[in-house]
Image (cartoon, helix red, strand yellow):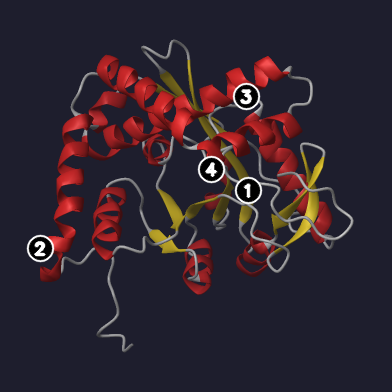
Amino acid sequence: MSQQQAYIPSKFQWSFLLPKYWGIWIGITLLMLLAILPWGIQWRLAHGLANLAWKYLKSRRKTTIRNLEVCFPEWSPEEVEKQAKRVFIDMMLGIFETLNAWYCPQWFKHRCTIEGLEHITNAQKQGQGVLLLGTHSTLLDAGGYLCAQYFEPDVVYRPQNNPLLDMLIYRCRATIYKHQIDHDDMRGLIRKLKDGDAIWYSPDQDFGLKQGVMAPFFGVPAATVTAHRRLLKISKAAAVPLYFYRHGDVRDPKYHVLIEAAVENMPSEDEVDDATRVNQIIEKQLRIAPTQYMWFHRRFKTRPEGYEEIY
């Protein structure tokens, strides 16, 4: 495909008006209406949807329970199930929080605090880009919006298969992020880091061993991506841990953005040691608010010969 014909995520196409896209237009309209509802109603809807998801998304439910059993062996079976249900609630709350960030951002006014912003500004003052090591939080783009109140974040994203949905999400995120970088655009990602941007990057999913190494995650060997090592080495960027979470009364929630000091000697000469250190950072973050993480992903799906099956 030529450059002139290349798909631009934010560009409207007249084909989006065809009947095959009408369902998406209706769905987006309903979501916009949900975004203007009072939080109390959103909270109740989230709980109702979570109950339905818990009942009917059996595979996700089993994966969530298994992940929590493996990562929190100190929890009793009853506690595991309780926290697993909480994961589903937090996921649904996160959807409403993201809708609020997209369509009703004033809802977050006076609800957010930040700690450690100097770790980003100091790196940028020294001419460095910042690779923000975070997680796949159930807050979704609401977390990005929280960060955007204090600095200009970029985000790495995976394009949607449906071009209309991709355009709509891209445009919503454009109100939050300075730049959106396709996960396959490594040159673009490196260029932004060299330009001094702060980019939210989540190295916390299992993409197999072609893109990573086995390293302990909550004490269990897990396939851990190592792409961030190459990004950091080429761009000379600082690796800065980032975490955001909801706290306080869930009926009147508050949000906190936590930024920690840059990871020293990252990357090192040992990719397993680097992967282990990143996993330890993520573990520490997740223990703050354990259920605000996407535990329904199969974090331990890669099991080389000699490793016990998890699922």
Q: Position of residue 155 (x, y in %)?
A: 44, 53
Q: Which residue is tagged 4? A: 136
Counting residues from the N terminus, which is met first, the one under dot 3 or under dot 1?
1
Residue 17: numbered disc: 2
**How many angstroms separate mark 3 from mark 4 (CA)?**
14 Å
The residue under label 4 is which amino acid type?
His
Counting residues from the N terminus, which is met first, the one under dot 2 or under dot 1?
2
Numbered disc 1: secondary structure: loop
Counting residues from the N terminus, which is met first, the one under dot 2 or under dot 3?
2
Numbered disc 4: secondary structure: loop
Q: Position of residue 22 (x, y in %)?
A: 14, 55
Q: Which residue is tagged 1? A: 204
Q: Are marks 4 and 1 in contact (CB under 8 Å)?
A: yes
Q: Which residue is tagged 3? A: 288
Nearer to us of marks 4 and 2 is: 2
**How many angstroms separate mark 2 from mark 1 (CA)?**
37 Å
Counting residues from the N terminus, which is met first, the one under dot 3 or under dot 4?
4
Q: Compare residues 234 and 252 and report the one nearer the observer.
A: 252
Q: Residue at x 53, y 37 (%)?
A: 58
Q: Please determine whether, in this image, residue 113 is positioned above or below residue 2.
A: above
Q: Please determine whether, in this image, residue 72 is positioned above or below residue 242.
A: above
Nearer to us of marks 3 and 4 is: 4
Q: For residue 28, what is the image quadrant?
A: top left
**How many angstroms separate mark 3 from mark 1 (CA)?**
16 Å
